[in-house]
Image: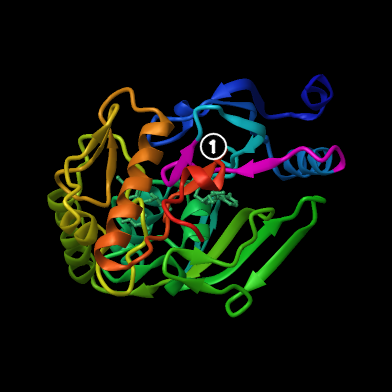
Amino acid sequence: MSDLRKIVQGTLLENEPMSRHTSYGIGGPANAYITPKDRLDLSKILKFANQHSIKTYFVGSGSNLLVADSGIDGLVLTPAKALNQLKFDGEMVSVESGVMLGRFVKECMKRNLSGVESLIGVPGTLGGALVMNAGAFGSEISKCFKSVEIMNMVGDINTYYEGDIDFAYRYSSIHEDEFVLLAQFKLISESSDFIQTKRDNASQSRKTNQPLKFRSAGSVFKNPKENAAGYLIDQAGLKGTRVGDAEISEHHANFFVNLGHAKSTDITALIRLARKNVFEKFGIKLELEVKTIGFDSKELEAYEA
Ligand SMILES: Cc1cc2nc3c(=O)[nH]c(=O)nc-3n(C[C@H](O)[C@H](O)[C@H](O)COP(=O)(O)OP(=O)(O)OC[C@H]3O[C@@H](n4cnc5c(N)ncnc54)[C@H](O)[C@@H]3O)c2cc1C
């Protein structure tokens, strides 16, 4: 760690509890939680980690992340605060990965640019939104995507354009060893009334349908093609089920909430329970939407693969 400390120009927090960096408020310590100062700093850290075979994870604001109570044996790198620029050129916008999605949406709305207003209220950074292909109320961030700059584990920067990256429902083909630096989007000029109405509908629907009083990571499972995951979990009779301080929300059964002091093992017990009961009742295998770090696959599975 002392060799790494000599390299890092940004901030390095040793043994940093990931519960401070996830919307669940859950997760044990990472060996080091690093916010690089700039691209040069990031490239040096990535090269160091690569040369020394140190496992490295990229994290935005942890709003789609479940980290094990045992923590992360490796480095966590985050762009938050360091890569924070947003530049408009007509209908084109370049956004660095540490920009919060909410800020991006508001800046587009100010300029009467449409395309991302339905994403209002989705927490997280631009980097996380692109990797996850964040979406809401019929809109997905990939719909306005033009290009992305990434840095790989040897510190090289590559640019991918439309067509180079596959996007699907809560999926992008951006590799887990590619750090998103910046993305470009093309929006569409629209009347402010049109944009405001779409934004308001999305915001109202989120407030009505989601348990926003408690900490969560949003939807735990992707919606299978047959039906919404929340409906299936509800029909399996699991709404309101509690393990420790974690609960399958009464409000929305695909949200598992932390009532205060939930452990990752409480959430994983609910994940297995939901998978098992939905499979037994409907024959449908639920696929995780939340990303997980630090678990054995058996902790998350409810049936033989
Ligand atoms: C209350 C609530 C409501 C939500 N509603 C929605 C919703 O309506 N729609 C929706 O799509 N999601 C929703 N989410 C989930 C979450 O907000 C999104 O998935 C969000 O885009 C994640 O962004 P993040 O920065 O927090 O990413 P993280 O959770 O930190 O990471 C998510 C993934 O992105 C990768 N990643 C993050 N940053 C980078 C980077 N710079 N380079 C490379 N990889 C990176 C991580 O490795 C991980 O695989 C909700 C979550 C909550 C808590």
Q: Which residue is mark 1?
A: 81
Q: In percent of the image, x 15 and y 46: which residue is there?
A: 251
Q: Is residue 77 visible?
A: yes
What is the magenta range? 51-67
In this view of the protein, which residue sits in the foreground, 67 or 82? 67
Q: Residue at x 55, y 51 (%)?
A: 97
Q: How many marks?
A: 1
Location of residue 258 (image quadrant): top left
- Report the residue at 28% width, 59% height from top: 278
Foreground: 56 or 4?
A: 56
Toward which corner of the image does residue 189 lie, by quadrant?
bottom left
Give the left or right position of residue 235, taking residue 161 as reference.
left
Confirm or reject: label 1 Cβ below 8 Å from ligand 1: no
Q: Is residue 39 found inside the magenta-colored segment of the image?
A: no
Left or right relative to 148: residue 45: right
Q: Quadrant of the N terminus?
A: top right
Which three-letter amino acid code belongs to the residue tagged 1? Lys
How far across and down, in percent of the image, does residue 286 sit? 37, 60
Residue 83 location (% of width, % of height): 59, 44
